[in-house]
Image (tube, rainbow, N blue to C red):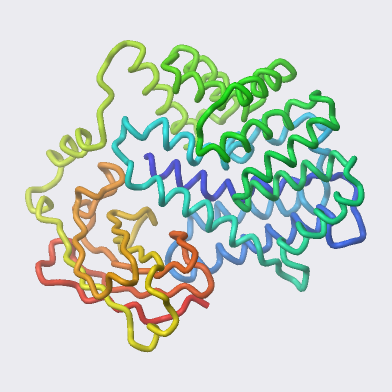
Amino acid sequence: LFWMLVAAMVMLAAAFVLLPALRTPRADSTDPTRLNAAVIRQQLQELERDLADGRLSQADYESAKADLERELVYATDGLPNPATGSGTAGRSHWLVAGAALTVPALALVLYHQLGASRIIPLLQAETQQTSSSATQASGGLPSVEEMVARLEEKLRANPDNAEGWVMLGRSYTVMNRYAEAAQAYEKANTLLEGRNADVLAAYAEALSLAQQGQTSDQIRQLTQKALALDPTQPRALWLKGFDAFQQGDYSTAVEFWELLAAQVDPNSEDHANLQQAIQIAKAKISGGQVPTASAQATAAEREQPAAAANARLSVLVDLSDKLRAQVEGDETVFIFARAAQGPRMPLAIVRKRVSDLPATIVLDDSMAMTPQMRLSAFDRVRIEARVSKSGTARPQSGDLEGEAGPVAPTRTDPVPLTIDRVVP
């Protein structure tokens, strides 16, 4: 469930910056309509690649594609100005509105409870990949980075454009330039005289991201001001609850997260994931024991056939000679197992450096992200390895990768895996 939450957040985090920042179209390349449409079309292309490569099921592809196509309609038709509008769209999709913060924030909330410390760097890497994939535009338009650079230029010439600063803050956020995003939102907030709840919440969010999910008096003040203006502001509700949780005020955390949950479709996965965080806080209030990931795994093992307990794969990972000239040695190598048929969530993952190769690594159930998504839960798995030039977990053009399988998770002899191709 935790990884499914993360997967949903990562997918939605990319869409966060896509909400149009300006109502009025412009003729130049910094026009928000063109910028938004360029990013969304790039995301559609990425979905198609993931489907073709088997990284995404047909059902997940169709669902994500429908969401992005809907965003494309919004982007090209125009939406209310975020610097002056009501923020209704953000409330109807609270994960879109707060995904960039929620990825690290909820991971930290559940960190000690679910025992998933090993995946937090991966979550951050996934978010970085999402943002980097948005830096190339399609259809002959300038890249997103070029558009952002031109927007920066325009704001230097016209620094009193609050709408432009909001758009720049959103762009910086999706590019993981959080400190710069905070500065952009600060300028927008000053120009708007602190009267816009969405901008106040976005400013607080960017500051929290820049501080690795930590809260501060400034973030608290901004969040409080946002809620004073709009008691239903999704980002502010999340931040308020998260800050309370960090302070040990679990009742307040529950109060604000339940207000947030009331804005989410009760039949959605988003709602279920938020309820999980609420239940953790409630367990803290009652003094009950919140099961750790290892405890849950132990219970789950009782439900697995005895043979499944032997799920353990040894993998011999090497880099082909023809590709060695393309690496320096300090690049990150991700080695992970996925179900041959089923969810994309890694069942086990190991992180190495190119300088460690060749290396024999072991993948087993102790590396599971959740009790349900383990090697022993599947009959056949695929092993993948990727040399990431940027340190991100998802593939980017220029990365090196290889795969092996499908194999049985109970295979006893080492699985040879050679990294032998370049990601186009």
x then y, percent, for residue 377: 22, 51
- Residue 265 shown left or right of residue 39 in the figure: left
Residue 187 lies in quadrant: top right
- Residue 39 shown left or right of residue 249 in the figure: right
Residue 131 lies in quadrant: bottom right
Q: Split into 4 quadrants, where in the image is the N terminus?
A: top left
Q: Residue at x 17, y 35 (%)?
A: 299
* Nearer to us in this view, 421 or 53: 421
x then y, percent, for residue 321: 33, 87
Q: Residue at x 21, y 73 (%)?
A: 316
Residue 147 lies in quadrant: bottom right
- Residue 95 shown left or right of residue 155 in the figure: left
- Which residue extends farthest bottom? 322
- Compared with 133, 397 (above or below) is below
Q: Residue at x 49, y 64 (%)?
A: 390
* Nearer to us in this view, 116 or 11: 116
